[in-house]
Image (tube, rainbow, N blue to C red):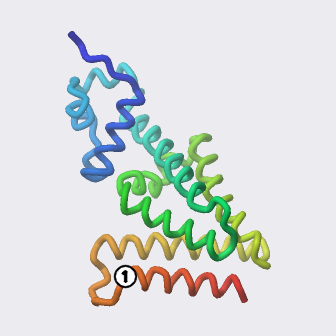
Amino acid sequence: MKKKINISEIVDIAIFIADHQGLDNVTLKNIASELNVKSPSLYNHIKNFDDILLRAANKSLNNLYESLIKSIIGLEKDQALLALSNEYRNFFKSYPGQYSLIQRVNIWNKNKFSTSKSDKILKLLEKILSRYDIKNTEAIDFIRVWRSYMHGFLLLETNNGFGLELDVNGSFIYGLEVLITKLQN
């Protein structure tokens, strides 16, 4: 008897593999193996491998958005920015494969659903920044600097790039406080 699978299961397994084994291990062969089917049977549900990656990126963007929005409910300004940043960091650590998919903009940037979710994530930051007395161009600059700080810090942290015994959490908060100070001036 053939095992019945659907596109949702394929995407969930791709995300599972990405988060637990790394994005490079998301292959048709590995997905099929996890689902206990043969690789060619996946094509009954997908166009090609890129279709899986796009769908997984869509779901990952949605997952990030949902976790970020929950983290800032009822908060404003400094508290909201700190909570959002901490949740972003938690997402990175908890779901490294999904984070990698989100960073591969070339996979999803031409898909309306994905760009809509990405825009919603940026709107969360814009909403927080709207409480400060800064111009729109400054908000764009701040978002770019914040994203660069977050991505760089997280990559260094997970690759053991901070060799000193000083508390990394303290350094993370210190960096955010430096950014927030710029907003307050």
Query: Residue shown at 61%/71% (left/top)?
Result: 81
Q: Position of residue 64 (x, y in %)?
A: 51, 53
Above/below status of 148 relative to 171: above
Q: Secondary structure at mark 1?
A: helix
Above/below status of 136 relative to 43: below
Q: Position of residue 127 (x, y in %)?
A: 72, 63
Q: Position of residue 155 (x, y in %)?
A: 37, 71
- Specify few, some or many for label 1: CA neighbours under 10 Å numbering under 14, 14-19, or 20 or more: some
Query: Residue shown at 39%/35% (left/top)?
Result: 11
Please name the residue that numbered disc 1 is placed on: 168
Q: Quadrant of the C terminus?
A: bottom right
Q: Residue furthest front?
A: 74
Q: Amino acid at mark 1?
A: Val
Relative to the observer, which residue lies in front, 118 or 65? Answer: 65
Relative to the observer, which residue lies in front, 163 or 54? Answer: 163
Tell me if 118 is positioned left or right of 92 in this view: right
Query: Residue shown at 56%/45% (left/top)?
Result: 114
Above/below status of 39 relative to 144: above
Q: Quadrant of the N terminus?
A: top left
Above/below status of 140 relative to 16: below
**Which quarter of the picture shows residue 160?**
bottom left
